[in-house]
Amino acid sequence: MHDLEDKLRKALNRAARPSSDFDLNPAITLPPGRVLRPAAVLLAVWLHPETPRLILTKRASHLKHHPGQIALPGGKVDQGDDGVIATALRESREEVGLPPDLVEIAGTLPPHETVTGFTVTPVLGFVRAPFTPVPEAGEVEEVFTVPLHHVLNPDNFGIERRRWRNEWRRYYAVPYGPYYIWGATARILRGLADRVQP
């Protein structure tokens, strides 16, 4: 377990290319002068004795934005937040019932730009103690975990495509069982996987 933690901490300092929803779509022209809204997500690594797992959510199907999609706990930075780490911890408490004092922050990855106009900072944290996930009523349909080794293996990622604003958009996907993990979440996880590899 200590080897894994050490590997993840070192990965945070390893150089890698910038991250965005446009990585695989160089032909898409971004509007000049666009203003991105700051947000943060928590890569919560739950250190289970059997196998470390990553905490994810399935968004409620009735939501206006990204209904039913798989996401990391997180959201936009509020005025009262003391930076992106505070945002990631607050949102994780609200969305999955994770107490902030159970999370040991390891650091952050470079921000990820989304097609919806956010710059999302991924925050990596370790959860050592047991806790009972509680989905946020009305926002989160399900809280679940995937084995960390699944999303740290680049071979498990594929590149798929779909129509977006009358153009074909390519994106990363890393399915796990019944869960289709794709888009910004998959791209952020792929960024971590790329850094962890020797």
Image (tube, rainbow, N blue to C red):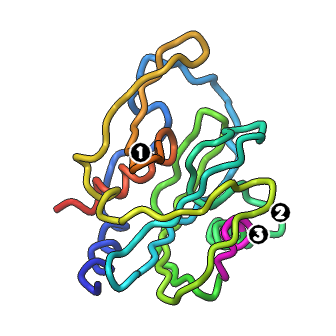
The reply to whether the C-beta atoms of the residues labelled 2 and 1 are less than 8 Å apart is no
Quadrant into which the N terminus falls: bottom left
Q: Residue at x 47, y 47 (%)?
A: 179
Disc with the residue nearer the chain's start (3 vs 1): 1
Q: Is residue 159 magenta?
A: no
Q: Residue 63, percent across and down?
A: 77, 41
Q: Is residue 2 left or right of residue 93?
A: left
Residue furthest front in the image: 178
**Relative to residue 30, is residue 154 depicted above or below?**
below
Q: Which mark is residue 81?
A: 3
Q: Residue furthest left?
A: 198
**Residue 83 screen position, x and y as percent:** 68, 68
Quarter of the image containing the C terminus?
bottom left
Magenta region: 91-99
Question: As rendered, which of 141 and 31 lies closer to the eye?
Answer: 141
The Cα–Cα distance between marks 3 and 1, rounded to whole angstroms, is 25 Å
| Circle 3/circle 1 CB separation < 8 Å | no
70 versus 100 height, above or below: above
Q: Main secondary structure of the magenta part?
A: helix
Q: Residue at x 28, y 86 (%)?
A: 2
**Along the viewing direction, whichever of 3 and 158 lies nearer the viewer:** 158
Label 1 element class: loop
Task: Write the residue at 50% across / 35% down.
Answer: 21
Q: Is residue 94 magenta?
A: yes
* Percent position of residue 143, x then y: 60, 62
Residue under pointer 1: 18
Q: Secondary structure at mark 2?
A: loop
